[in-house]
């Protein structure tokens, strides 16, 4: 059986396969959505299909909403061509629960899907509709970048600013062009909601849109008043949000499970832009979405699905709690040591007593004393769920190699902010042992030599070449000291958020790094000695 609108009519097949079908009139939903859309989303990746699209489905099934969601892709149009259009915009969500059970359902809440490069005019018509309340985004943190390292605009961005809103070529230029279309065709209100995992994501999206509005205003290509429209929070809002749901790439074991149930064409697809997509997504059960309640044109009733609407300050505190204490530092700790110890699954790492003690130390012992308490979620309850339920889930195919990507960008936030809080509160950083172990472990990881002395592939990182050059010449078995090579890194606030020597942790990190280079088995030895 293929996944498409026609196959949904065969209820007996889906019941036998134990895959839940949507409990609403899909054709009626599609008609209503196209006539008066409320919600459009940009970025049809795994997190979208497993979370926002599933929430839209929940609202349809309980009768709270009659319209679904429209999705558009502006970077890799093959996703639409190969994973949406052939499947009539359907997907299968497989929820992998920690108790070993799975829940499978057809997500049918997507009313239409568009390629921004080929269907921009159609998207203009949608964006101009007064009924539209919300445009949301999961385009990754990199998707909001306008400039390169030298501070100059990327060529496509510069060209879009120069030529105006009519036919932009860049992703963000097209988003700004859609906003301009809404402005000139009635200037209806709208919430622009980034759901990407970057701090103050709403401000980042606003800054990008304001850049285009300024440029187009200055060169006379924008309608008069467009810049003021963008800046008027009663017209266009850019709420902050915090999202949390682990959605690894589609796993072969899940594909095999669906294939054995009788479904055809469940294999993954790799696009020319190296995007991996499949007709299904697999995800954990736990999820959080906290959004600043700033919706000038009303909003879908997402609070009925567990979304928490609150003020900007609370969103900020929830994000800091998660990113700086209760989840992300634990993930990074498992990532760097997991790679060196030969693990390929996070869940397998959680059977390792030393690694469990490491993340308990990072989270409970050294993180919670200075955690930011958001009030609406208890930090200890959050971290309890992470350590006891989420990370040990044996059915979640998440890998330390994936999490280790871009670690140089993550360390300053995931550990540096905690060290800053220690300084502010007058606590003695010199007493810390778990955080400096992870910092030293990351540098040891960058050598690409595992605990057994065998080479492994370091995950992609924008600073890898620079760091590898700085650490060049260091080999397993060298006695050290390595101060001349390590001090420029350990003292660099860009890497650790603080100068580790200023908080009395530089020498400790040096020693731990040196000890982990003693020979085969040294990483395990130092880890075990430190955490026990």
Image (cartoon, helix red, strand yellow):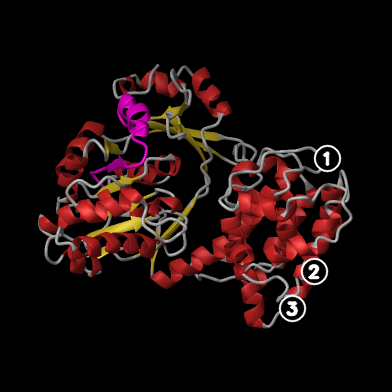
Camera-side mark, 1 or 3: 1
Q: Which mark is residue 452?
A: 1
Which residue is label 2 attached to? Answer: 507
Q: Residues within 10 Å of mark 1 (few under 14, many from 20)?
A: some
Where 18 falls versus 393 (above or below)? above
What residue is rendered at 36% in x and 56% in y? 153
Confirm whether residue 95 shows in the render: yes
- Mark 2 or mark 3: whose residue is earlier in sequence: 3
Which residue is label 3 attached to? Answer: 428
Q: Residues within 10 Å of mark 2 (few under 14, many from 20)?
A: some
Q: Are marks 2 and 3 in contact (CB under 8 Å)?
A: no
Q: Are marks 1 and 2 in contact (CB under 8 Å)?
A: no
Where 368 falls versus 299 (above or below)? below
Camera-side mark, 2 or 3: 2
Q: Position of residue 92 (x, y in %)?
A: 42, 31
Q: Which mark is residue 440?
A: none
The quarter holding residue 365 reads bottom right
Instruction: Describe residue 508's horizontal placement relative to residue 442 as left or right.
Output: right
- Mark 1 or mark 2: whose residue is earlier in sequence: 1
The magenta stretch is 64-89
Q: Nearer the viewer, residue 49 or 475?
A: 475
Alpha-carbon span between mark 1 and mark 3: 35 Å
């Amino acid at each position: 059986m293929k996944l498409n609108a026609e196959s949904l009519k065969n209820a007996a097949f889906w019941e036998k396969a134990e895959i839940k079908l949507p409990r609403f009139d899909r054709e009626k939903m599609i008609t209503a959505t196209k006539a008066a859309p409320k919600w459009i989303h940009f970025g049809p990746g795994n997190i979208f299909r497993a979370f926002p699209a599933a929430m839209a489905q929940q609202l349809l099934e309980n009768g709270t909403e009659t319209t679904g969601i429209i999705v558009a892709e502006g970077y890799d149009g093959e996703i639409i061509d190969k994973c949406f259009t052939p499947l009539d915009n359907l997907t299968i969500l497989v929820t992998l629960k920690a108790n070993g059970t799975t829940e499978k359902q057809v997500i049918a809440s997507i009313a239409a899907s568009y390629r921004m490069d080929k269907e921009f005019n159609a998207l203009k018509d949608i964006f101009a509709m007064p009924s539209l309340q919300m445009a949301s985004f999961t385009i990754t943190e990199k998707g909001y970048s306008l400039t390169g390292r030298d501070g100059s605009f990327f060529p496509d961005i510069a060209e879009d600013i120069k030529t105006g809103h009519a036919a932009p070529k860049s992703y963000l230029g097209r988003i700004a062009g859609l906003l301009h279309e809404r402005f000139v065709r009635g200037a209806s209100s709208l919430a622009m909601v980034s759901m990407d995992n970057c701090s103050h994501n709403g401000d980042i999206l606003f800054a990008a849109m304001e850049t285009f509005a300024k440029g187009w205003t200055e060169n006379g290509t924008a309608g008069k008043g467009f810049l003021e429209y963008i800046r008027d929070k009663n017209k266009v809002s850019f709420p902050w949000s915090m999202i949390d749901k682990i959605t690894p790439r589609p796993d072969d074991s899940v594909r095999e499970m669906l294939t054995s149930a009788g479904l055809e064409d469940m294999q993954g697809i790799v696009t020319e832009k190296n995007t991996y997509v499949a007709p299904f997504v697999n995800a954990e059960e736990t999820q959080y979405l906290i959004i600043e309640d700033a919706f000038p044109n009303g909003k879908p009733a997402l609070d009925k699905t567990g979304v928490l609407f609150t003020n900007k300050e609370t969103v900020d505190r929830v994000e800091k709690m998660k990113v700086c204490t209760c989840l992300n530092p634990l993930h990074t700790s498992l990532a760097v040591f997991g790679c060196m110890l030969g693990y390929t699954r996070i869940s397998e790492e959680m059977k390792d007593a030393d690694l469990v003690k490491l993340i308990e130390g990072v989270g409970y012992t050294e993180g919670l004393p200075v955690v930011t308490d958001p009030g609406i979620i208890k930090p200890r309850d959050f971290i309890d769920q992470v350590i006891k339920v989420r990370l040990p889930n044996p059915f979640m195919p998440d890998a330390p190699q994936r999490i280790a990507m871009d670690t140089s960008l993550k360390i300053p936030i995931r550990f540096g902010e905690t060290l800053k809080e220690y300084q502010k509160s007058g606590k003695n950083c010199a007493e810390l042992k778990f955080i400096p172990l992870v910092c030293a472990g990351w540098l040891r990881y960058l050598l690409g030599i595992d605990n057994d002395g065998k080479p492994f592939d370091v995950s992609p990182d924008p600073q890898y070449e620079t760091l590898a050059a700085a650490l060049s010449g260091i080999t397993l078995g060298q006695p050290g000291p390595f101060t001349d090579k390590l001090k420029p890194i350990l003292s660099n606030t860009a890497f650790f958020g603080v100068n580790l020597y200023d908080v009395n942790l530089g020498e400790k990190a040096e020693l731990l790094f040196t000890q982990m280079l003693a020979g085969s088995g040294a990483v395990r030895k130092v880890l075990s000695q430190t955490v026990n």
